[in-house]
Image (tube, rainbow, N blue to C red):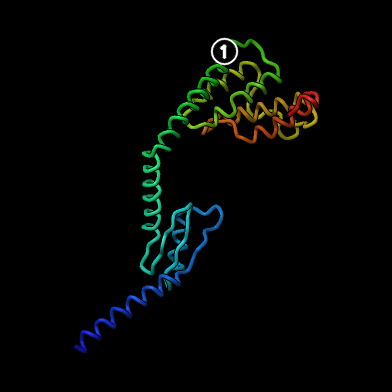
Amino acid sequence: MEQIIFAVLLVIGAAVSVLIVLSSRRVFVPRVGQNIGSAATDLCMLSRAWPAEMEFNGIVLRGWPWSRAGELAAQYHATLESDRRRYQESDEGKAAEVDRLRRVAEAQTVVDAYVTSLHNAEEMTTQEAVDFMAGIRDATDLIGVDSKAKTIVLGFERLGFVAGVRCGDDFDGDDPEIYGRWLVGRALDGLSVPPYAIHQVFWKFHKEYQAMSMPAEAVQ
């Protein structure tokens, strides 16, 4: 009888110990910009003496004295993939995919129309070149859209616009013509290298160009 009581007490003691460990687990907060591999390594180091946990992109990972960074990172990616598949198979995910495909198709139509106009152009003013880039900017940045980057770059070269112009000492932020050609050159820079898209910062410079090249009441 005494042995049974002693065994029960041991089980209760072990359970209490586990509860204490779980309730006193330390929390690790990943640094801004830290990737999962680095964060998992830091979590493992923190967990060597006492269990710890962290939340990475909404996924909770728990580290124990025996945990390995590679295994934690693999667990994170597996959970991420599982969540992705679950969302894709949900009604919300299916509706989102239909909407995404619609937006890609619309964006591709926009790019194709601009490329056709470029083929037919015999000349182009700086204002027209800037307007062209503004017209395709968002479409080129959408995954699934063929930006026709090489065709656009070659087409603009034919019309006298090249990447990387009016930089350094050649740049004049007060001259609309120079600023416009510089802006077109920046857009062509983005279309010349992967991911073959015009960077979203284009809109900041586009607004500045509009302010100097158009009447104040026309700039929104």
Please identify the quarter of the rendering in which residue 165 is found: top right
- Give the amino acid type for the residue marked by disc 1 in the picture: His
Q: Residue at x 44, y 67 (%)?
A: 52
On the image, the x and y values in percent for residue 85 come to 37, 42
Q: Nearer the viewer, residue 196 or 85?
A: 85
Q: At which x and y percent is residue 140?
A: 54, 28
Location of the C terminus (image quadrant): top right
Name the residue that disc number 1 marks. Answer: 119
* Residue 70: quarter of image: bottom left
Q: Position of residue 101 (x, y in %)?
A: 45, 28
Asked whether, in this view, residue 170 is left or right of residue 131, the answer is right
Q: In the displayed structure, would residue 164 be above or below residue 55?
A: above
Q: Is residue 47 left or right of residue 219?
A: left
Q: Quadrant of the N terminus?
A: bottom left
- For image coordinates 52% across by 54% down, the residue present is 34
Position in image of residue 117 (x %, y %)? 59, 13
Q: How many marks?
A: 1
Taking the view exactly as shown, the residue that stands out farthest to the left is 1
Residue farthest to the bottom? Answer: 2
Which residue is nearer to you in this view: 148 or 86? 86
Name which quarter of the figure residue 141 lies in: top right
